[in-house]
Amino acid sequence: TIPLVAWRNPSGKFVSIESNQGSLNFSDGETHGSTTIPKPEQLFLFVPHPDFSTKSVIVGHNEKFLEFNPSDSNKSSSFGFELKTPERLPFILFDYDQNIYPRGANFLASRLQQPSIIKAAVPPPGKGTRVRVWKSDPSVKTIGIRELFLIHTDIKSGPVDPLFETVSTAKPIAPDANGDFLLDFDNTPSQAPNESDNHTRFDVVHTFSTVRYTYDLLLGDLVYLDGNPPQLTRPWGNKRLQIFPHAGEDANAYYSREEGALKFFFTKRKDGTPIFLCRSLDVVAHEAGHSFLDILQPQWRSDGQTGGFHEAFGDLCSLFVLISMADIADLFVTLTKANLRDPNNFLSAVGEEFGDALFNNKGKGLRNLSNDLKGSKAQPEVHALSLVFSGFYYDVLVDVFALERNPVIKGDTDTLLDVATILRRALIIAIRVSSESSTKTKYQELATNLETAFETLSRRLGVNLSSWTEIVRKHAKARELSIAGLS
Ligand SMILES: [Zn+2]
């Protein structure tokens, strides 16, 4: 299918192209009753690429194709290509009002004029930083504390690096002679609020490293998609995001744009023993995910489906982080015999230790991505509502993994790592091409844009992902994404 799209400016006028030289014009659309739709000359055949700055965007218009070429000094060039039957192009995106405006015209124009920036330097082998982290949380004994390799060589005593700094009662922690932060976590009881210095120091490194790893993964996707290091516009300002592993007592953790901070609190179980939310990789990745999504789509902090997606993206970040680590993916495949629906799996469970403290549910998690919540049954509260989208995305992961599995010739761990990477990048594309505003039907918009993303990635990878598209459609419908939380 070929998406037809239109761009509308804030005063509601649609963009069209005046001539083959590519000058832009804004004018009214066609009004039918209370709705306004674009006129044929305001519709474009959109050939999406996440980076408009280095790749041409080709649009169809009045039986012509027009190619924007940002490296051309005129910012555009054109070539005639007869589009014989434009009226037969499927108007697939018309069902969802916002999908016909994937980006504002100003955004497109600004990207077209953005100069290319240089390629990221490849870190030399044998360099970088080793750290120790909880790869799930202290309650998941099969995982425990493991080492993690960060490619960065610029993590300084603190830890602090160009993007993040930690704020803690612990004195700044210096790397060892190899540039590593390999702390031990003494097997002594935790004590809140005055946690032992040993535990505090471990928490600082763990929390920083988990945030850093989450960002590395997602920033890496942007570099993969754009070919350039991303220029981040951080909504909290041009300063480091502050990480507070021990922000105080509360059954909570949060990202705050206003404070420019990720804050993790401790709470107490019924027996009075403390539980530190910073020790959950899931919780830390979730909050890091909120901050990253706020960079990509700063108007999405909201209620309804858009706010629900913010929560779903946080939970999916913990999935992405876990499933990107070869040791964890392999452990998962081994423990579950490659069954993503295993009822006790640690992958779909988010926040096991905290969930157990709240619900005494034996590792099922604060939330579980392997769920069957349909849109018509969802509560409007954003965390509850998030389960519809995260569950949908997990459905897609399950079916795509089943489709691509071929363990006789390729190990399940490798397949899981590969499938998860492509699905993660597809979601990043879908987020970037979705409308900037908070909308009531963000879930279906994102699902539709996942299909577009598969087309982009299939060209990139040279593989046919049309079966993946069918899987997305099937589950978007079955989950009732379009009506989630609207009743
Ligand atoms: Zn959240």
Image (cartoon, rainbow, N blue to C red):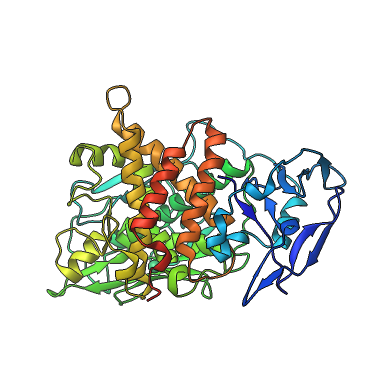
Q: Give left or right: position of 93 versus 304.
A: right
Q: Quadrant of the N terminus?
A: top right
- Using the rendered image of the protein, determine whether residue 246 is visible from the camera's viewpoint: no
Which residue occupies the foreground of this view, 270 or 152?
Answer: 270
**Quarter holding residue 192:** bottom left
- Residue at position x 39%, y 56% in the image: 476
Total tally of numbered discs in the picture = 0
- Using the rendered image of the protein, determine whether residue 122 is visible from the camera's viewpoint: yes
Q: Is residue 426 above or below residue 137?
A: above
Q: Is residue 401 above or below residue 474?
A: above
Q: Is residue 376 above or below residue 74?
A: below
- Residue at position x 19%, y 41% in the image: 336
Q: Is residue 34 above or below residue 49?
A: below
**Quarter holding residue 58:** top right
- Residue at position x 83%, y 43% in the image: 77
Which residue occupies the foreground of this view, 321 or 46?
Answer: 46
Q: Give left or right: position of 348 versus 63.
A: left
Residue 288 placement (x, y as % from top left): 44, 60
Residue 264 placement (x, y as % from top left): 36, 68
